[in-house]
Each structure stands twice: as C-alpha cells, then as structure tokens.
Image: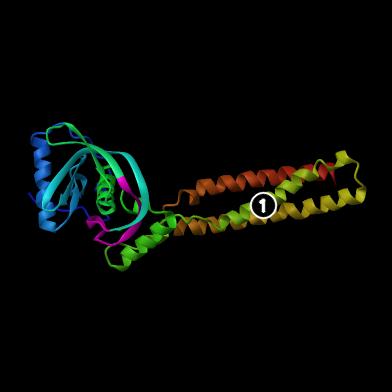
Amino acid sequence: MVQPLKRYPDESINVNAGPIRDFHETYQQILTDLIDTIEAEGLEALSAIQIGYAYQLMVIKENNTYHAYANPRIITQSDPFDSTESSSYFFDQPITVKRYGKLSIVYDDAEGKMQTIKIDERDKAATFQRKLDYLFNTTLLDRLLPHQREQAIKALAGKGHMPDLSDAFCPTESKKEYFVSVADKLLFFMFISLFLPLFNLSKETLSGWYTYDKFAFPTVIILMIGFFFYAQYEAKKYKQCSSCQIGNNIGVIIKRGIAAIAFAAGAYFILG
C-alpha cells in the first residue's frame, strides 16, 4: 500500500529506527509499502522511517529490480568525495555533503541471514549512505557544517518549501565574546599588580599601576554591562542557541564582577 512521505519540517522522522527481528509479516508489510511508495512517487530509494515505520529497512531500485537491506551497517568506507544529493524529505532541493565512494556493507536478507556486499560506485554508495542516515536519526542538513546548514535552510526557504530558520541557529562566533576577552585581559593585569610590591619597585611605578587598577575596575564593569545587553539581543535573535541563554550570561558577568571587585579592593589596600 502506498504511504504518505514524510516531508520537512515533520520531526517524526527524527528517531533511531529499531532492528527488524521478524522477517515474516512485519517485514513483508513494510517491504511492500516501501516498493509501492517508490513506484507511486517515482523514487529510486526509500527508508522505512520516511513512510512512518521506525524499522531498519531500506529499499534501493536498480535496473527495475528492488533490493532490500534490513539492519544494514557499513563496515569499511573509503574514497571520500563531495556528493550533491537531493531527498524527497527536502522536496528534492540539491545539497552537497561529504560521502564515501567505496563501502563494505553487512545486512540481513529476506530470510534474516546476514549478507555482505561491496559498493564501489559513487552514486550507489551515496544513495545507500543517505538512506542509512535516515535510519539513525540523521538527514542531509545534519551532515553540513553550521554555516553551510544556514545557507541550505535559506536556499530551501527560497523555494517556498521551508520556513526561513536561519536566525534560529546559534552563530559560530559571537561578538559578545569580545567583551569577555577585553575584560579578562584587564583583570589579568589587575591580578598581576597585586604582587608588584614583592619586587621592590619604586613608589612611582606602584602608583602608576594603582592608577591602572582604578581605571580598569570601572572599565570591566562597563564591559560586563555591554556584554549583558548584547547577549540579550542574541538570545532573542538566535532562539535555539544554548550559549545565548540568560543563565550562562549571568554566570559570565558574576564571575568577572566578583574578580574585579576583589582585585580592586586588593589594589586599594596593597597599592593605594
């Protein structure tokens, strides 16, 4: 029976499929539905999870023959290459990912007996890996680097198939870290200044360092205030970014604030 295909953003596809143990009724039902759906949709391959069956079974069509792979695993892989692929889950939008052109595979046949094969054709190897990904809670987007993922989502959104979620993903680099970096450098030299009296330095030199400490302390506080407001901006913009959450940001501010107060107090009593 033909089954409806899972399409983005249907998240029911994001599960780890279980192994097939029954190679009679359950196996035959899933296999029949996979083949019928492949024919109806004009596809070349399909994983069971793509039609709602959370089982480790895929079917690949080759020369009008259907090859079923139950409980498939890749044993060895070589010949890495960039593979431009499309998937019915992503409405056939081309996406380029890393694949391997040569595979050694084990799987169970229709009788539940383990079989081994080797694939040395890149197109077939890429198809096998893409269908295998779906069985283990992975899609083409999961194979991309963060910035590539954002670009792919924008391209898919441009086709009208997906919402533009580029602002929902955490940036690979956050400008708020500049606030922290400068504050840490100021705090480091404030800490070093506390030990300067041990080196018999002149009063003028110690006085200069104390002046530095009096400047550095309010600067660190101002930087942490700036950090807080910029972090709030990112938390609103990148809603799925764990590093943007307010708890993490408050922890950063408290640590630097306590250090600044402690070093400033130490400078007052030691250098002042």
The residue beneath circle 1 is 183
Question: Which secondary structure, mark 1?
Answer: helix
Percent x, y of residue 219: 70, 56
100 or 4: nearer the viewer: 100
Give yes or no for residue 99 being in the magenta stretch.
yes
Q: Is residue 137 visible?
A: no
Please indicate whether residue 233 sits to the left or right of residue 46 in the image: right
Please indicate whether residue 92 sits to the left or right of residue 26 in the image: right
Residue 43, quarter of the rendered image: bottom left
Percent x, y of residue 250: 56, 47
Give yes or no for residue 147 being in the magenta stretch.
no
Give me the residue at 77% from left, 44% from top.
Answer: 192
Inspect the image, locate mark 1, and give the three-letter code of the amino acid beneath it: Ala
Please indicate whether residue 150 sits to the left or right of residue 108 in the image: right
Magenta stretch bounds? 86-102
Percent x, y of residue 18: 23, 36
Which colour style is shown? rainbow
Give me the residue at 78% from left, 51% from top.
Answer: 213
Q: Is residue 268 above or below residue 234?
A: above
Percent x, y of residue 262: 72, 42
Give me the residue at 34% from left, 50% from top.
Answer: 99
Crowd rating for badge 1 (residues with CA inside 10 Å; few <14, some 14–19, many 20+): many
Please indicate whether residue 14 sits to the left or right of residue 68 in the image: right
Q: How many marks?
A: 1
Q: Is residue 85 visible?
A: yes
